[in-house]
Amino acid sequence: SLSLASPPAKTLETSRLASPPPPCPSRRAGIPSATHLTGRPPGAEAMVAELRRDDMAEEAGTIRDSVAFRLVERVLQSVRMEPFLIAPYDLEQYRMMVGTLDTSRTKNRDDEALYVTYLKALSEAVSKIDITYHHSLLNNIFAVRIWYLQRDTMVALLDLITRLAAVADQYLRECLQMLVNNFTPPIVERNEVPTWAVSRKKDIFSHLCGSLKTISDTVPLAPRMLRDIIDRSMPKLFDNKAKMISFVECMLGLDTDRMGDLIGAILLAKVVDLLTELDVNITWEDILQEEHDKGIFEMELEDLDADDDGDGFGQAGTKVCLGGNACAEKLDGLMVVVCEHLKSLDRQRLYKEFVILKTIFRASLLRVHRSKFAQFIMFYTCSLDPKTLGEGFAVFLTDIVTEKKEDPISRMSAVSYVGSYLSRARFISADTVVTILKKLVDWCVDYCDHQSKREATPIPNHQLFYATCQAVMYVLCFRLRSIMDYPNLKSDLFHMPFGFLFRHRLEPLKVCLPSIVNEFLRQAKDAGLVAAFVDPAAEDAIESDLSRTFGGINRLDMFFPFDPYLLKESDRYIRPNFEFWSMVKTTYSDDTDDDDDELEDLDAPEMNVGSLDDHVEIDINSDDDDLEYSMNKMSITPHHSFLHQMAMDSDGGLSMPARIRPSTSPPSRWAMSGESP
Amino acid sequence: TPEITDAQALLGHRRPEPKLRPPPPLAMEALREATAELTVYVHPSNAADVRLAVSRQLSTLLFSYEDRFDGVLLSHEVEFEGDNEDGQDRKVDGDGKRVIKAKILDGLVPYFGVPVTANMLLFSPQPEMILEGKVEMLGKESIHAIVLGVFSAAIMADDIPEMFKFKRRGHGGKFISQSDKRHVIKKGSMIRFSVKRVDTEMNCHITGSLMPPHTGCMRWLSVHDAEYASEISRVVKGNQGIILRASRRYKVAQLRTAKIAW
């Protein structure tokens, strides 16, 4: 302890024994019960008496605190000059104090108590801290990893940080940076978070967010700085999964109340950027590929861990990270975090988030070429409030499609989204579907009329028109039967000029994907929607030349964004609201073993309608030994329906791990060009 | 944005003689209106809506301390001029009212400059000024308040009169004056304090002091401090217009904060 000859030393000694402040039970118990008994609100006399009682009760505690404070103040003051001017004794005192604040050494209980006392004293003495002269002290404070601290110590430290941030601008950035650095827990062996950290996670996050909010309340311009700091500290693509998830989870915890109003949009935008980046780095081969490779990479990663803290990646490590599986796992974990966050919002906040998400979606996700899973956050958000948000999203997409001023890529992408969304979202009601279809069909008809007025040579590229027709047909494949159940909707639908559209010289039926066209015609004929004379010869047609000229492998109208979701852990958020093809009732028959089902392979057909629980494993990491797998599965391939039956789970029975094919172009194209998706 | 983000480099202005006004009321000495003639450089892609581009460019300066303005910009309002002194024609509005063409000097300055007259609301706290703020956090050694909802102010224990004693009991603690127990400073109280120091480098942090006379909790002062009470009544009667205008500008500033933060 500090060897002071003055009386305060004794008190400090007492405090070192970590005894609680001597209570004044008699006085404390006296007055409150009196007021309770009388039931009258305290008059002026009682108030004065209470205040005096307060003084006494606190005195014992405050003596200790004030002594510590004066001590600390004195020490700080004594080194507040050029180093060569400081008396050696003072320097020694200062060094000892700094040493106590060094958290890299383990502490016993006494040290811990002393540490807490110092922290509290420093909280009061913040104005005496100088950024130049007390540099080593500040270093020790800002280097603390609060995950290793006990709870009381953590509270004291966070209080100190908050006060430092409030007292002067010069500490603000460091304080915010220190708090943001603590978003991620310490990582130990095998890149895992230790179990004790996992259990404390929620508590620590809530304290961190609480501190940040207090700082932002006291220094209203702090969120601007915080935004930049988070931007810089944001996990990158190749970072460790546990760290990434932890960081994003804590970050989204800031998205409430005032802080959320100020920087919530930016935080969400960053998260979506990260999701998109991960998404884009997953290639289809990685999802579908054999897992025997993983063992090799794992070994290499373990070797690396031995050398450094597991964060550095040498050349071998880079190979691991470039493997898309890592990205898929990270994306999976992040989707869980984001969905949980969205689920936790109240109604009002959810609406605000929805508006923000729409903007972000339009700016980034909409234009990502063939994004695989990131767009499902929109799906999930809409499912949280089908009436308002679900419809709102559909209308939003439709407006992009029909808006002339939008750029072509966005419009094409939006029409793919509309088609896929209306088909797959179970929570969208039939009348919304019909309303949107009406808008799309009206647009198509306008387009046709416009074309008819033109002169002889048509514009070569009617991509958007065909894509819209295809989307309409695709939606009707899924929804026709359910629409037929409502007489008013049925009549609305039957009033739509399908005949005109399909007999138009632009010949959408010949250009759109044959599988969709065939299925649609089949259902529509059964329902009586289209006249029988619409050419049935299209039934077995291979894709026409017209169809093939429209883009190569990457033709945009073969992108079905909301095709079945493949990520394992986050699937449970999506599945309850997702419509699988196997579950759809069609107009022609209710037989489940219909051989002619064109769209049989739309999803994994083994998926039993009954077992909609989570034990239907869509396993990215399944270790079946099917090597003959072809990557070229289109999700609605008409004639290449070879789903290899996977090795059954040991449970056997209904739930089989299924390979799900991506929605890519048919195999013929790939074979021709040899490109990867 | 395509506009130049480093407004410092190209936002030139001449400061004309400040418009003469009566000194603002005690309420908020640090707020003042100023008019400045500026040249805002706009990227050609924004030529369709120059007004918006200029407004956006000026908005990047909001809530930061500008040396040339000697204060923090809180809100701005622009008016466009006609021809300027150089004799070069400039483009103004795209809405057909009065189209003036601008020449873009390719290879030299790819932007075109728009002369504007900006009415600005500035906040320039100086030492010895009296400011008002709302208390946000209290400690035994410090009081933290927020001025105008945006600027943080801290009053350290050395600058709090001895007569104030800190009571930790109760929500967040409070300072009670020994001389008059009704003079209470707690979280949410409005206080008047004098400025000791302003740190203009980052967020315009203010260090204040409660030592000078006529400082403390405003509610108590309005009742017990005769001089202050008479002052505010005079101010309310005489200068209502200025206060109203300043408060409207402040509301605009608040709206702009929200927009920018978005």
Image: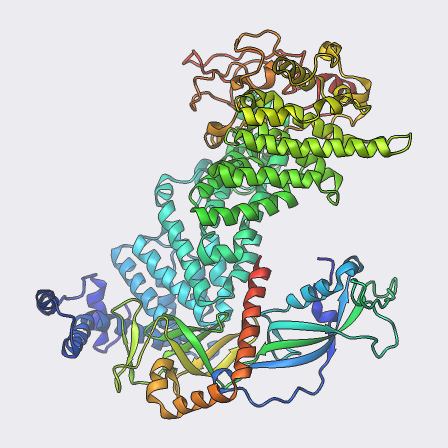
Residue B115 is at least partly visible in this image: yes
Nearest the viewer among B80 and A543 is B80
Q: Residue at x 35, y 80 (%)?
A: B219
User: Which quadrant would residue A99 be assigned to in this image?
Assistant: bottom left
User: Which quadrant would residue A410 be assigned to in this image?
Assistant: top right
Above/below status of A427 relative to A534: below
User: Which quadrant would residue A225 be assigned to in this image?
Assistant: bottom right
Nearest the viewer among A479 and A368 is A479
Whether residue B81 sits left or right of residue A161 in the image: it is right
Percent across and percent down for residue A473 are 66, 23
Q: How is the image coloured?
A: rainbow
Q: Residue at x 48, y 60 (%)?
A: A176
Percent across and percent down for residue A350 are 48, 46
Percent across and percent down for residue B130 are 47, 85
Nearest the viewer among A172 and A531 is A531
**Quarter of the image that includes the N terminus of chain A:** bottom left
Nearest the viewer among A472 and A231 is A472
How many dots with numbers?
Answer: 0
Residue A370 is at least partly visible in this image: no
Percent across and percent down for residue B17 are 70, 87
**Quarter of the image that includes the C terminus of chain A:** top right
Above/below status of A375 relative to A472: below
Whether residue A146 sits left or right of residue A319 in the image: it is left
Toward the right, the furthest residue is: A456
Above/below status of A255 relative to A45: above
